Image: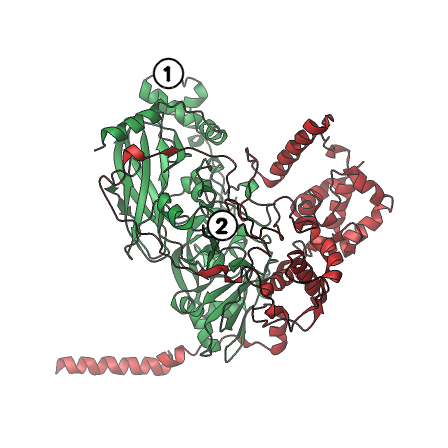
Chain colours: A red, B green
Amino acid sequence: MFKSRKLTFSATLVASVAAGVISSAAYAQDYNIGAPASAQEIAGWDIDIRPDGMGLPVGSGNALDGEETYEVFCASCHGVFGEGEGRWPVLTGGEGTLSDDRPVKTVGSYWPYASTLFDYIRRAMPFTAPLSLDDQQVYDITAYVLYMNDIIEDDFELSHENLAQIKMPNEDGFYIDDRPDVSNPRCMVDCADPETMMLQSSLAGVTPIGHFVEGADAPAASHSDQHDLEASKEAERKASITGVEIVAPVAKETSAMSAAAIAGEATYQAACGVCHTNGLAGAPKVSDANAWSERLKQGTDLLITHALEGYSGSAGYMPAKGGRADLSDEAVTNAVLFMVESQQ
Amino acid sequence: MTTPSTQELLQTMQGASEHLSVNDRREFLRRGMSYVAGAAAVGGTTIASAASLTSNLPPNEPQWGRQLGTGVVENPYGMPSRHEAQVVRRTVPWLTAESISSISMSPLQDLKGIITPNGLVFERYHAGVPDINPDEHRLMIHGLVDNPLIFTMEDLMRFPSVSQIKFIECPANGGMEWRGPQMEALQFTHGMLSCCEWTGVPLKVLLDAAGVQTEGKWVLAEGADGAHMSRSIPIEKVLDDTLVVYAQNGEMLRPEQGYPLRLLNPGWEGNTSIKWLRRIEVGDQPWHHREETSKYTDLMADGRARRFTFVQECNSVITSPCPENPILRKGFIEVEGLAWTGRGTIKGVDVSFDGGVSWRPAKLKGLVLDKALTRFSFTTQWQGEPWLIQSRAYDDTGYVQPTLAQLREQRGVNTIYHKNSIHTWQVAPTGEVKNVQIT
């Protein structure tokens, strides 16, 4: 009797709390959070392309038109022939090397689908200004890279209607993960024969290519130090061939610069140096006085305008603020002054 | 018990003249003070004599006990002691063309427990770290769903939250060493690995709100960064344990880790946990984008390649001793390390001191959690004998961490990714530790 009264009491309590304070379990799961995504909102962000052609914008392009576009936007990193500058990705060649000791994985030798090329160029290239190319430029560049890999002819009109039909050489070279692929018994004693064990110490210069590329034998602590190290080694190598004496680059004394230029050095290091230290995208290197002397004849004001608003010329391509829209006009101006005064 | 032959091998090692590498020298310089002090204690010599070394030591009252320290909110967001300045992320610059699309490694040699502090979680960017205003960040869900939705950050944080401790590892962790040892420090051999408590919402909850149609078999996750990094994820994983995460270790995500929103695929290769997440599209097949074809596919010796190699298989490494943590004193030593598996939970770890001839079980200590770093320990004595020290983890699926020889036999040496083999440190009679491989 007592037991049943207690149960009744509990049930009553739960009922009254549920009615007055908390929702029922089913209703609690009905979050009703978030807003409907409109077709227009989706269209702006839905940039992905699939191997079956889903997502391709209406349009077309060809390698003949793509050559010039490629040279403006792509060649400074990927090389005029897709051979790759420095450690930037190689796009061409490598056919038949995938089972070699040193495979070369390129668009032609490795990539399974042409759609991936269009998708990636559109979403992420050029490196310093992603999503800045229009569909026509993406079709042209895609066609040119396929042409350089002997996959299409130079006059082939690549379009949303035929891109999915292009058969890439290595399409059948992939299979779904089949791991676990090894079985190691949990042995506790006499698990290896000491007589046959070989001890291997550090090897130099054997890093796999692709994600990792063979590098200098004495890695520096930062990327800029590493660039300097490799530049000096390259200078030594050339000097050993030509006999020309190496002239050490003289670092500009910042004490001789204007206050604005000194203030601009930090912005240069953080934002501009990616291209202007190594000459990417045709950017004049700060260390290349010849490249700057012609530009300086046009006046500093024009250089600042080009830096702020963007510029595309025969030598290369400067996105507005170098693609760093978050930088203030003053920060960009100071960075230009730092580069200009580094020449004086 | 070691066989005479193993003893011979170890004696050969002992006899070999050990020249310190650049990294070792730097490390020994850094540790010079304690190393000398240790030598003095062991050998009874009096090398340390300067008054400055002893002025803060008993019986003297140290300087900091005779003055006031700094007050509250001197550092509104606190920082580690200035004496810990060497505990930082580091990169290997020759791996990548520049620092914007690159990787840095966590200092595993200095970490305690299983949680990686937020400022030390390894970094991997494909277009640098975007500076995202959370008020203007949106997550869009569309594709094969009944109700395409857009969420604000405020929306996402209204959902019931879950917090889980999970590791994240880059599949290229250790990838420089398929052909032989060449990284001279633990931070570089295994540091593309971190473990945090992550807080967010199961993606399944958000997809249920949108109503996935029956043909929906894959989702595409995409970032808001300049790379618009994208990966295809099978719906089975999403419905199992994929999270949409906005916090790590008690605070909002760090910009480096995807602020304000990232995906987390527990146990899977790190690049699938898309950072700065802005879009989820449901489809009936995978997208085969650049980061799942050109990159993050595993090239086998026969020239064919595995794709969608998602799982990070069972792995472990000894973190002390290691090249950065040489043995400084004879006597008692706790051998410690980390183990992890993307398939579930670490069941146990064995350690070997003779290069894998014989093994002894280590102890798991602290939390042992699903798809989280797990710390192991083996206490013993060291009297200056040379060691070839290894750890071998096994998980609750029965999978035992393999040898490098086994992986090479199956895969060749050009796969780059998913090298989870047993790792060997060579401990010299001086206490120095070097990275070696046994073949």
Is residue B382 in view from this perspective? no
Is residue A3 in view from this perspective? yes
Where residue B164 sits: x, y (%)? 38, 59
On-image quarter of the N terminus of chain A: bottom left
Where residue A154 sits: x, y (%)? 71, 61
Does residue A76 appear to the left or right of B376 in the view shown?
right
Q: Nearer the viewer, residue A95 or B360?
A: A95
Figure quadrant of residue B199: bottom left
Residue A99 badge: 2
Q: What residue type is labelled 2?
A: Ser
Does residue B230 appear to the left or right of B107 in the view shown?
right
Residue bearing the label numbered 1: B46
Where residue A155 sits: x, y (%)? 73, 64
What residue is at 22 percent from the left and 40 percent from the top? A189
Crowd rating for badge 1 (residues with CA inside 10 Å; few <14, some 14–19, many 20+)? few
Crowd rating for badge 2 (residues with CA inside 10 Å; few <14, some 14–19, many 20+)? some
